Image: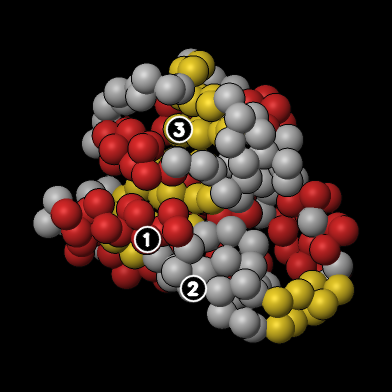
Amino acid sequence: MKFLYVHGFNSSSASIKARLIREELLRLDRGHEFRAPDLPHLPSRAMQTLEQEITRQRTRNIALVGSSLGGHYATWLAEKYDLVAVLVNPAVNPHVALTPCLGRQTNIYTGERYRFTLRHLSELEQYNVTAISHPERYLLLVQTGDKVLDYRHALEKYRGAQQVVIEGGEHGFRNFFDYVPLILGFAAGKLVQPATASPRV
């Protein structure tokens, strides 16, 4: 199994969630299974980077893990390549949700500065999946305390997928490490619910 982590808006491969998954796989002597590329801010170039990663693996035994905007990208890739995807507080319709972000932006991890423009929004819309075709391939993890995105939009979009809804929390997904075994288990074809989660199928 290969894991491809897809980070969110103004994030990077150095994000906490990416690090926690990598560390757990290293502990299991499976560090070679993990990839987390730094994505360009322009959606078309970000997608090109991700597709190159998938092609480079020369296998379809790949599990995508997408956080926030990365969930938007991961959904499109899962549909195109028939892959398993774990979505963590995913962005739904980011071409609308990110409209207030137009203008100057700075990546909080890399320090890169750029302008977020209408081109970004247009490209994000091109990668929008209106309805998932195989809900069983998806695991949705959301926290109701997310103040950045409305978790209910994700519940609706990924209806029929395995859904774990955690009361409270935040957009960054509080206590993410507790759910890493769940993510690895889902990728292996099984789902064992943690005691603090409210599963919805």
Kindly check if marks 2 and 1 are in contact, taking CB atoms under 8 A apart as contact: no
Residue 176 in the image: state x and y as whole percent: 43, 43
Q: Residue at x 40, y 65 (%)?
A: 36
Proximity of marks 2 and 3: CB atoms separated by less than 8 Å: no
The CA distance from mark 3 to mark 1 is 20 Å
Looking at the image, which is closer to me, 116 or 120? 116
Task: Measure the alpha-carbon separation of dots 2 and 3.
Answer: 23 Å
Residue at horizontal 62 percent and vertical 82 percent from the top: 111
| Colour mapping used in the image | secondary structure
**Residue highlighted by disc 3:** 139
Comes first in the chain, label 2 or label 1? 1
SS at mark 3? strand
Q: Earlier in the sequence, mark 3 or mark 1?
A: 1
Circle 1 residue: 19
Q: Which label lies toward us, 3 or 1?
A: 1
Q: Position of residue 170 (x, y in %)?
A: 62, 41
Residue type, numbered disc 3:
Leu
Residue 26 pos. (x, y %): 19, 59
Residue 90 visible in the snapshot: no
- Which amino acid, by three-letter code, is at mark 2? Asp
Other-residue count near label 2 (Cα within 10 Å), few / some / many at <14 / 14–19 / ≥20: some
Question: Is 32 drawn above or below residue 64 in the view shown?
Answer: below
Kind of residue at badge 1: Arg
Foreground of the two, 130 or 28: 28
What residue is pinned by disc 2? 38
Which label lies toward us, 2 or 1?
1
